[in-house]
Image (tube, helix red, strand yellow):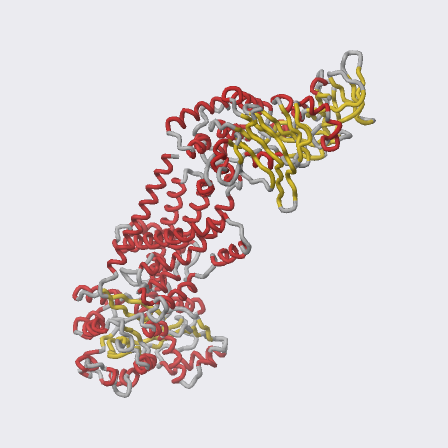
Amino acid sequence: MNSFVRLQGLTKRYNDATALEDVNLEVKRSEVITVIGPNGSGKTTLLRMMAFLDKPTEGEIYFDGGKVDDNNRNHLRTKCTMVFQKTALFDATVYNNIAYGLRMRKRSKGEIKERILEILELVRLEGYEKRQTKKLSGGEQQRVSLARALVLNTELLLLDEPTANLDPRNATIIEEAITRVNREYDTTVVATTHNMFQAEDTTERVALLLNGRIAEIGTASEIFRNASKNLASFARLENVFSGISKTRKDGTSLIEINDNLWIEAASRKEGKATILVRPEDVIVSRKTVNSSARNVLAGKIVGISDMGSTVKLNVDVGKPFVAQITKRSFSEMRLNLNSEVFLTFKASSVYMV
Amino acid sequence: MKRMGAESMWEILEGVGKVILLFGNPVVLETTFRSIVVSGTATLLSALLGIPLGVLIGFKDFAGKRFVKTIFNALLGVPTVALGLILYLAFSHSGFLGFLDLLYTPVGIMIGQAILIVPIMISLVIHAVESVDPDVMDLARTLGASETEASFAVLRESTAGVTLAFISCFNRAIAELGVAVSVGGNIRGWTRMLTTTIALEARTGEIEYSIAMAAILLLIVFAVTLVINLIQGRRL
Amino acid sequence: MERKTWVWTTSLLLVVITSMAGTAYYAATSTREKLVISTTTSLYDTHLLDVIEDQFEMEHPVDLQFRSAGTGLAILHAQNGDADMILVHDPSRERAFLEDGHGVCRKIIAYNFFAIVGPEADPAEINGKLPPQALLEIVEAGRVGQAKWVSRGDDSGTHTKERDLWFDVGLNWTELREEEWYIEAGAGMGATLQITEQFFAYTLADMGTYLKYSKNNIITLKELATQGEELLNVYSVITVNNCTHPNANFDGAISFIEFLISERGQQIIKDYGKSTYNQSLFYPAVAFLKENTEPATVQWIKSHAFFDGYECPPEYQNNHPELYS
């Protein structure tokens, strides 16, 4: 088996806290692997070590067959690049942001220019070269970050929650760009997410990271099948509920989460089930909306987090439920803490395992 | 001093009007040029020491860092008269630096002003470096920069703050009086600066001339700030 | 970025080159022969010395550098070896300066009179009175709340003079300063005059500053008591002793004294201010003392500013008796 990056017994401790414990993982050349786990499970720490930004406390990393040590770490750092979850930008133009890595690699001016124009097209930011990055929207900024990494054409690309907090349009552009470089340049991609559906959509293999340990590795459906085993931790992911499912005549299922909370799913299942709903598939409204969507839940906003171009709402519908909407609709609806809202989503948006 | 209100306003306006005429006066031009060169050089001297030190303190985490920062912040408030007196005692022929022969020379004022503003430079550079997004260092590293190159990336991010440090230092230097008087001695045609001229002319009752010189000083301060901000690309 | 870097580099280079050139220029010109003269603000602020400087430098390859401070500080600077000569008006301190070995070759060059100035209303009614009487009137009026007195309070030559005046009329300055009508400015002559104006008070003023401020309409105070030996103000130069201060430019100082006591030098002093104020600010003293033209005033100067009957006692003449012949 051609293992490109191999992590062996990787442990990382910060003072007293253990961020990662005995992580073993093999990443194959040209594969896309997603690390999924709730916030605080150690995903970012794992990526930072794979990007050679931090050193492990214990354990070894093998890169392309060779062991990583203090002598080659700085050099190896040029063979991979990481896109941070929190968009980091140089206070400069889009062009100069993207050119930075190429300049560090001493590429010629002509080549730099050519590559930048190419990559801007890929992330759909044509004509943005002279814009100041600090004046762009959150989604555009994240696309600049991605372009800045993609332009280097490194063998290994590490993406920390690349589409988290983005509106669907920006998320799609980024997902497409990642898929394309993986296909065209055989770039090996390791991405993290706390969103189950992203894992399901874009990847072949998924590693489930819980409390600094890898709990499962496999395809998305394999992971979900064993979800019950890790249910306690799993529940810390967003919009993951378990209940009893009953099949109905029309081929849909009705899942009883608790006495007052019922959710309709488009797939069939009998008995114990775990369901997931993407926060961005949920429509939030002040009044009930007239639509064919089968699920309408009434609740009260108990938490609001600003995600840049989007806003994440924690809504109490009997269980905590997360919905993600654009900032624009958030301000148009004049939502506040304690606002009464309705959450509407289709039965086909409910993923059941 | 008996005339107040509208009339003294008029007096100020009249003084400002005379500034334009003063530009034809060689003594005024010479004094203005001297002030700019002396304070400009003092600013460069303070940058020579202040930028590396400020960057070092800004980058590193060490025990007592807060204490060091507090000291420099406190030094921002040193009265120029007190510093001037101390420097006089040091530069005096009977002082321990008397052999340098810096008393009553423009070079002496340069050094005195540099000492006055170096804490400002250090404090503002520390602040500028610390205000840079901490992720920039990692960002540069993951894009292939060596540790040194990454530090430079952080420095470049702090350009706006460092520029502000330059402007503040130059403005403080060119507007200070204590050092210029005590170390320079306000010697006509030799160490006479804009501020010492203003003080002298006010003292000898030439209020209008004094106000006109003050207007020139303000003009320089505004012009320097404006030009640097323009070069900066309107990003301050 | 390329364009911006270019702009930055160019402007930085410009700044560095300008300041280096400036520094070099100042460092280079500082090698000219210098003569540093520590003087008092009240004399310096009249701008008489600027005229003298221009004349002297035209004829001598010397860079005259006047440095003004209160008399006390001016003398201190010289004691520290930071001046080549002093030009002051404080005989008792001058004597100490000689006796402490710091100075030699003292020469009286000019004199004028202080004035007691006050508001036109003159609440203490001192107009035209002799100084001792005027001062006593002010004290009396002050103690009943009719008048105020502003003192320089800055240990300057004028301040010394004021304290001597109080002593001469039998009053102790350290006691007066505790009284309510007695205000201490702690400031230069100009500021003191402005404070006096504000309080409708009286003060002791040197003529130079007083005339300038009056002419520029900054004050409306009037000269009330101007006559009398007590108000005599004598200016003299003393060169710094190059035995105790080897760095001192002694020869330069002597040539400057020679210029000051020459007929031309004395004429400059005599003429200064005439066109502006219609009166002389200073009276040349050299010929006057030599020829004894006005015995009464000469007698005043001798009793006020001579030491043991000498303008400069022989032991301090340092082989330059020609200055005193």
Q: Which residue is at the far bottom? A: C308
The answer to whether B64 appears left or right of B38 in the picture is right
Figure quadrant of residue A316: top right
Q: Which residue is at the far top? A: A250
Q: In this view, does C324 lie above or below B46?
A: below
**Count of marks, rendered view:** 0
Quarter of the figure with the C terminus of chain C: bottom left
Residue C243 vs residue A80, the one in the foreground: A80
The answer to whether residue A165 of the structure is visible from this angle is no
The answer to whether C287 appears left or right of B83 in the picture is left
Residue depicted at 50% across the width and 42% down the height: B132
Quarter of the figure with the N terminus of chain C: top left
Figure quadrant of residue A244: top right
Residue C4 vs residue A16, the one in the foreground: A16
Residue A154: x and y in percent read 49, 28
Residue C309 vs residue A321, the one in the foreground: A321
Residue B73: x and y in percent read 50, 55
The answer to whether residue B215 of the structure is visible from this angle is yes
Residue C71: x and y in percent read 35, 73
Q: Which residue is at the far right? A: A259
Residue B28: x and y in percent read 29, 54
Residue depicted at 41% across the width and 67% down the height: C197
Q: In this view, does C65 lie above or below C166?
A: above
Residue A81 vs residue A256, the one in the foreground: A81
Figure quadrant of residue C157: bottom left
